[in-house]
Image (cartoon, grey):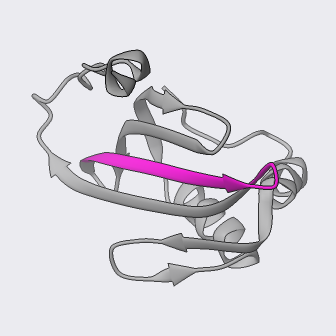
């Protein structure tokens, strides 16, 4: 369970900033966020009490990073799906979608198809 960002907020912010491509865009269900706005958004989530209860990597290659996590914020739990597209070694585009889940929802299903199976 992750309850906070790195204790050194400035270091945390620098790590995020260094990973973002100059053309970075983050698409949420209700907004488009760019550059430094993303850093502020993530910091605001942690400041508001975001808890990451579980996280599972589902797919990764040199251009794509896909994971799901269960988060808790404002007393509600959400299952989120996160995908990043990388360009020039940096996070270029990011999309997140989520749905509210009950306390009975306990685990993220593992990847059912491997990359090798997808290529066949």
Could you say where residue 8 lies in the image, as x and y percent from the top left? 86, 44
The residue positioned 35% from the left and 47% from the top of the image is 81
Query: Which residue ends up furthest to the bottom in the rendered image?
Result: 31
Looking at the image, residue 75 sits to the left or right of residue 86; the answer is left
Q: Which of 9 and 109 is in front in this view?
A: 109
Up-down relation of residue 21 to residue 115 (above or below): below
Q: Quadrant of residue 47?
A: bottom right
Query: Which residue ends up furthest to the front in the rendered image?
Result: 120
The residue positioned 50% from the left and 82% from the top of the image is 32
Asked whether 56 falls inside the magenta stretch, the response is no
Quarter of the picture holding the C terminus: top left
Up-down relation of residue 4 to residue 22 (above or below): above
Q: Which of 63 and 26 is in front in this view?
A: 63
Q: Nearer the viewer, residue 32 or 45?
A: 32
Could you say where residue 2 lies in the image, as x and y percent from the top left? 54, 32
Asked whether 81 falls inside the magenta stretch, the response is yes
The residue positioned 65% from the left and 70% from the top of the image is 38
Looking at the image, residue 78 sits to the left or right of residue 39; the answer is left
Could you say where residue 5 lies in the image, as x and y percent from the top left? 68, 43
Q: Main secondary structure of the magenta part?
A: strand
Q: Which of 93 and 56 is in front in this view?
A: 93
Could you say where residue 57 lies in the image, as x and y percent from the top left? 47, 27
Magenta-highlighted residues: 78-90
Q: In which quarter of the image is residue 97?
A: bottom left
């Amino acid at each position: 369970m992750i309850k906070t960002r790195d204790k050194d907020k400035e270091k945390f912010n620098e790590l995020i900033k260094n990973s973002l491509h100059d053309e970075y865009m983050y698409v949420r269900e209700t907004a488009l966020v760019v550059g430094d706005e993303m850093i502020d958004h993530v910091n605001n989530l942690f400041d508001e009490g975001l808890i990451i209860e579980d996280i599972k990597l589902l797919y990764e290659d040199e251009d794509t990073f896909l994971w799901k996590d269960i988060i808790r914020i404002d007393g509600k739990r959400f299952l989120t799906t996160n995908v990043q597209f990388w360009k020039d070694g940096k996070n270029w585009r990011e999309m997140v979608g989520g749905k509210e889940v009950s306390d009975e929802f306990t685990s993220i299903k593992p990847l059912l198809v491997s990359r090798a199976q997808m290529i066949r």
